[in-house]
Image (cartoon, helix red, strand yellow):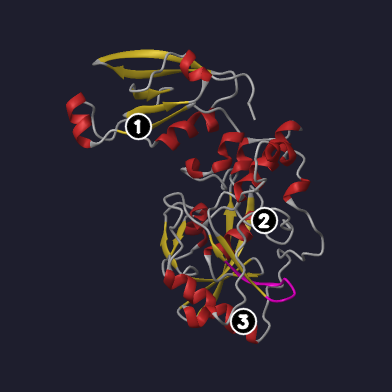
Amino acid sequence: MGRLSRQFVCVRIQSMNGINLELFQFEFDLTWMSFFMDAENRIYTRYGGRDDSSPESHLNRNSLLATMRSALALHKVQDVLKSRLEPTGRTVRTPEQIPTMRAMLAKRKNKCIHCHDVKVASLRHLRNQDKLQRHMVFTYPTAANLGITVSPDRQSVIRTVKPGTPAARAGVRRGDTILRAEDHRVLTLGDLSHVLEKTADPGRLSLELKRNGRAIPVRLDLSTGWRKSTDPSWRESLHVVGPNCGLWGRRLNANERRRLKLAPGKLALKVTFIWGPHTRKAGIRVGDIIVRLDGQAQDMTIKQLNAHPMLNKAWGDTIPIVLRRKGRELTVRMTFPRRPAD
């Protein structure tokens, strides 16, 4: 990789302070993203992105090396992305211009703007204008939203197609290679997500596939809500759209479950930390085991538990929570704050 990387001018951006958001468009909930560009700020390809399972689901050495080689080949012939979906970079908009960012930075000594801060500030600004809707947290959809998975190593190659999904109905097959989405070249998951971010809900998506050496056009019909994913609990920006439980915890392991006679596959989260006044007011204590939340008893991570009210409850709502404490089961009622405390 060292020899290959020496053919690039590598720039590492560690904060978003002063960055042009019109040029660098990506999923701000991610932990890492890269752009391959020429000296005129024109983009060859993007590398980065994830599915709901892991922040590194599509980050690996093989795919990065392949993307670097592709970018070099494109650079030799100056084949930059020219689709209507590409930013020109001629206008400048920085994170500091988001109205709610100033209040966020006032609380920080180093004034560093993280990637997720950009999205959080943008959503808070919409909330202050009474324009925020929960679905707005589902930015930069991935291949999974179409009903397909792509190979982590060869990210334009379709690994699976889920029956009954838009991709399946359009005739997409396992092993197909995505050449273009709309008029946009696709080499990586990052390229595809960039196109999907610009696609309407509901909407239509045109793909050009390669199958057995032939180019095949298909069109996907995307119904209302197609941008939502099954487990968005990893998104840092999620806390802006709804209330949380005000606590942290861990899942019980198999031995702990057996000792307490709690079934596998069912909710069993031990409270390890409480930060919410509404949590203490509900009577929840460190050491309690949550076995049911708002009627939900399926196994969850702590992030999934906090995400449930964020996605399904309003500020001021009250939910029942069933706890196991010292061998006894008891039900408490948690009332969320009437308004967010930023």
Label 1 neighbourhood size at 10 Å, few (<14), some (14-19), many (20+)? few
Rendering coords of residue 251 (x, y %)? 32, 34
- Front residue of 178/71: it is 71
- Label 2: which secondary element: loop
The residue located at (22%, 31%) in the rendering is: 256
Q: Helix, strand or loop at disc 3?
A: helix
- According to the picture, the residue beneath numbered tag 1 turns out to be 298
Query: Gap in Å between the C-alphas at discs 2 and 1?
Result: 34 Å
Q: Is 133 situated left or right of 218 in this image?
A: right
Q: Amino acid at mark 1?
A: Gln
Numbered-mark total? 3
Is residue 342 found left or right of 66 in the rendered image? Answer: right
Image quadrant in which the C terminus is located: top right
Q: Which residue is mark 3?
A: 74
Residue 210 visible? The answer is no
Question: Relative to 222, is 89 above or below?
Answer: below
3D distance between C-alphas at marks 1 and 3: 48 Å
Which residue is label 2 attached to? 198
- Residue at 68% from the left image edge and 38% from the top image edge: 104
Amino acid carrying label 3: it is Leu
* Residue at x 49% of width, y 56% of height: 50
Q: Nearer the viewer, mark 3 or mark 2?
A: 3
Let me know if residue 33 appears in the view: yes
Dot 3 surroundings within 10 Å: few (below 14), some, or many (20 or more)? some
Magenta segment, which residues? 38-46
Cα separation between marks 3 and 2: 24 Å
* SS label for mark 1: loop
Amino acid type of the residue that numbered disc 2 sits on in the rendered structure = Lys
What residue is drawn where x is 73% and y is 34%? 131
Hey, which quadrant is residue 267 in on the image? top left
Which is nearer the N-term, disc 1 or disc 3? 3
